[in-house]
């Protein structure tokens, strides 16, 4: 009977342990393979940080306002009662279009003053001519001549003052002759639009009594705006104010439609800081396409503040683990160093590096994710 050779006890124990061990599932085998070091035949792309010229910007918020340079506020030219109103909110009016009519006793008094002033001019002029004739024949003293001529000049000045008041009340110079002859004593004033645009506000109705000169801030009876352009007024915080320059590009986008861009240039930088928000008002004028912009709308604003040079690396070179951001720096042949960096703005396929790298460093770009495990 042939006897089998006896194996050492240690070998038998190892074989028994291997037999009892269950085979690892495929997922575990894949996971262990992923954690193994990268194959030695992987050749990563090594690049050097490079400087790029980029646009510096300030991102903030703002509001849309009517263009004050294309806005007409209509006030009461005199105290009186409104007889008729011709325009409504939303109406498009042309320059000179009738807005409303008021009946004012002030107009009657102004016409009477003008007629009296014209009569005084005629009387004082005749008196001055008579005094000149009498002085020529030495019938009156020179003092009396000077007094009559001075009265004539005063009368002319009073006539001009009365005429100016009539023009303020909307009376045309063509009507002055009839007023002087007392043929025109009407007390109604037709208030017209001084410029064309859209009626965006109306605070008057028939029968309403309106006052003139009762307050330093009179009530706007009508507001007519040209909606072809609008103002975008942005709020810029104090630390960013030194970066602002006039005529730099300024782009506004609606929060409801971020794809719609309204481009303009900085036309005004306030010299006052708001004591509540600690911001400075910055304004630009933009074209209101399709009248999509409405007054008091909130918008997102981006203001260009010039260009600067930024040290950049490819996005593929950046790794993040928790709160740590790092890159793999090639130190020599087959030697990599994990180095923490501080990133700045995102530049599309690249990212700005503000600290941690220099232009002479060499970092692993494409394929660096395959070599992360070798630097742990």
Image: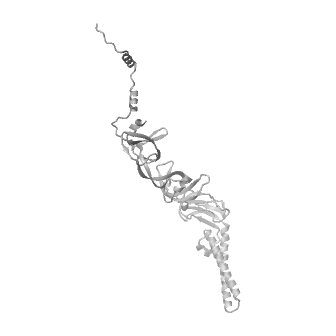
The N terminus is located in which quarter?
Answer: top left
Residue at the spot 71% in from the left edge and 89% down from the top edge: 141
Residue at the spot 31% in from the left edge and 12% down from the top edge: 5
Q: Nearer the viewer, residue 291 or 12?
A: 12
Residue at the spot 60% in from the left edge and 73% down from the top edge: 175
Residue extending farthest to the bottom is 137
Residue extending farthest to the left is 1
Height in image: 174 above or below 39?
A: below
> Quarter of the image holding residue 21?
top left
Residue 31 in the image: state x and y as whole percent.
40, 30
Residue 327 in the image: state x and y as whole percent.
43, 42
Residue 109 in the image: state x and y as whole percent.
68, 70
Whether residue 13 is visible to the viewer of this picture, yes or no, is yes
> Quarter of the image holding residue 74?
bottom right
Left or right: 135 in relation to 352: right
Count of numbered circles on the image: 0
Q: Nearer the viewer, residue 90 or 178?
A: 90
Residue 284 in the image: state x and y as whole percent.
51, 57
Left or right: 10 in relation to 286: left
> Quarter of the image holding residue 18?
top left
Q: Nearer the viewer, residue 361 or 74?
A: 361
The C terminus is located in which quarter?
Answer: top left
Colouring convention used in this rendered image of the protein? one colour
Whether residue 289 is visible to the viewer of this picture, yes or no, is no
Q: Nearer the viewer, residue 298 or 39?
A: 39
Left or right: 323 in relation to 180: left
């Amino acid at each position: 009977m042939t006897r089998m050779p006896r194996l050492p006890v240690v070998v038998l124990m190892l074989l028994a342990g291997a037999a009892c061990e269950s085979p690892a599932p495929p997922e575990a085998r894949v996971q262990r393979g992923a954690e193994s070091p990268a194959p030695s035949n992987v050749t990563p792309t090594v690049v050097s940080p490079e400087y790029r010229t980029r646009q510096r910007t300030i991102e903030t918020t703002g509001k849309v306002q009517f263009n004050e340079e294309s806005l007409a506020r209509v006030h009461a030219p005199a105290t009186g009662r409104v007889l008729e109103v011709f325009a409504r909110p939303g109406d498009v009016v042309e320059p000179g279009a009738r807005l409303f009519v008021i009946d004012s006793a002030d107009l009657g008094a102004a016409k009477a003053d003008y007629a009296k002033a014209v009569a005084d001019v005629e009387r004082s002029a005749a008196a001055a001519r008579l005094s000149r004739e009498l002085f020529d024949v030495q019938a009156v003293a020179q003092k009396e001549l000077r007094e009559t001529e001075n009265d004539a000049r005063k009368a002319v000045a009073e006539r001009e003052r009365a005429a100016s008041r009539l023009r303020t009340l909307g009376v045309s110079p063509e009507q002055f002759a009839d007023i002087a002859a007392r043929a025109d004593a009407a007390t109604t004033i037709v208030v017209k639009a001084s410029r064309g645009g859209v009626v965006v506000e109306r605070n008057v109705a028939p029968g309403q009594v309106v006052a003139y000169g009762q307050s330093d801030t009179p009530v706007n009876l009508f507001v007519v705006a040209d909606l072809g352009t609008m103002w975008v007024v942005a709020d810029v915080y104090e630390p960013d104010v030194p970066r602002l320059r006039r005529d730099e590009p300024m782009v506004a986008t609606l929060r409801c439609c971020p794809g719609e861009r309204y481009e303009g240039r900085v036309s005004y930088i306030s010299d006052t800081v708001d004591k509540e928000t600690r911001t400075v008002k910055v304004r630009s004028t933009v074209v209101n396409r399709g009248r999509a912009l409405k007054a008091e709308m909130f918008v997102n604003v981006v203001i260009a503040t010039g260009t600067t040079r930024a040290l950049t690396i490819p996005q593929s070179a950046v790794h993040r683990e928790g709160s740590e951001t790092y890159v793999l720096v090639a130190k020599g042949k087959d030697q990599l160093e994990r180095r923490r960096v501080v990133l700045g703005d995102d530049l599309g396929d690249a990212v700005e590096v503000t600290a941690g790298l220099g232009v002479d460093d060499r970092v692993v770009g494409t394929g660096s994710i395959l070599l992360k495990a070798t630097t742990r």
